[in-house]
Amino acid sequence: MQIRPYRPDDRAVCFHVFRRAVHEGATRYSAEMRQGWAPQSEPDLSRPDKLLDQHCWVAEEGGRVIGYMSLTPDGHLDTAFVLPEAMGKGVAAALYDPLLAKAQALGLRRLTVHANEYSGRFLGRRGWRIDRMEPMALPNGAPFERFHMVLDLAEAPA
């Protein structure tokens, strides 16, 4: 596995990683919730690529993108998705390491995230704490509960 910076030509493949991670990997959620979370089958290329304005890393294996993770300049972990067949194989951890190093290099004191059940467990093992629960409705009206989590970088495990 190789970790590299995100490039503009990664946009479509990262969208499909996101879609597969939600629809095939997040099986603890109902089909209605997964559809509300990722309703489009193709990326909307008419909109700006938000990942170009973030610090984003891509995991590749055999030249194939298998996951990605991004951090906004102000310290919000915005995206973290891994292909279903690569889940549980260290991909998220490999992506997390450069993200954390970048946050520390930028002098950020605190990181935040809106975590789902899957990312919440992963981040909790890395010192993140739940600040509050955030019940919400997805665009299709399906209820969705996420967690606002924080990491104080002064207390982050090395």
Image: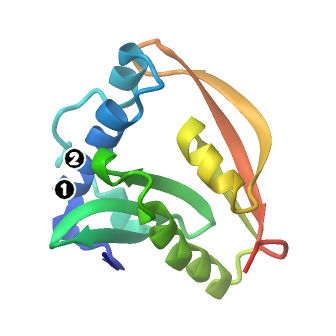
Q: Describe residue 21's horizontal placement relative to residue 70 as left or right.
A: left
Marks 2,1: beta carbons within 8 A: yes
Whole-percent x and y of residue 103? 62, 77
Q: Is residue 148 above or below residue 105?
A: above
Q: Describe residue 124's horizontal placement relative to residue 81 as left or right.
A: right
Where residue 60 is drawn, which disc sits there?
A: none
Work out how far the residue at label 2 is from the one at label 1, CA to CA, in angstroms.
Answer: 5 Å
Whole-percent x and y of residue 139? 42, 21
Which residue is at the front of the view, 145 or 26? 26
Badge count: 2
Quarter of the view holding residue 134: top right
Tell me the amino acid under the disc marked 1: Val
Quarter of the view holding residue 95: bottom left
Whole-percent x and y of residue 110? 75, 66
> Mark 2 packing: few (<14 Cα in 10 Å), some, or many (20+)?
some
Whole-percent x and y of residue 148? 70, 42
Quarter of the view holding residue 76: bottom right
Residue at x-position 36% and y-position 37%: 25
Q: For the N terminus, which image quadrant?
A: bottom left
> Mark 1 packing: few (<14 Cα in 10 Å), some, or many (20+)?
some
**In this view, which residue lies farthest toward the right?**
155
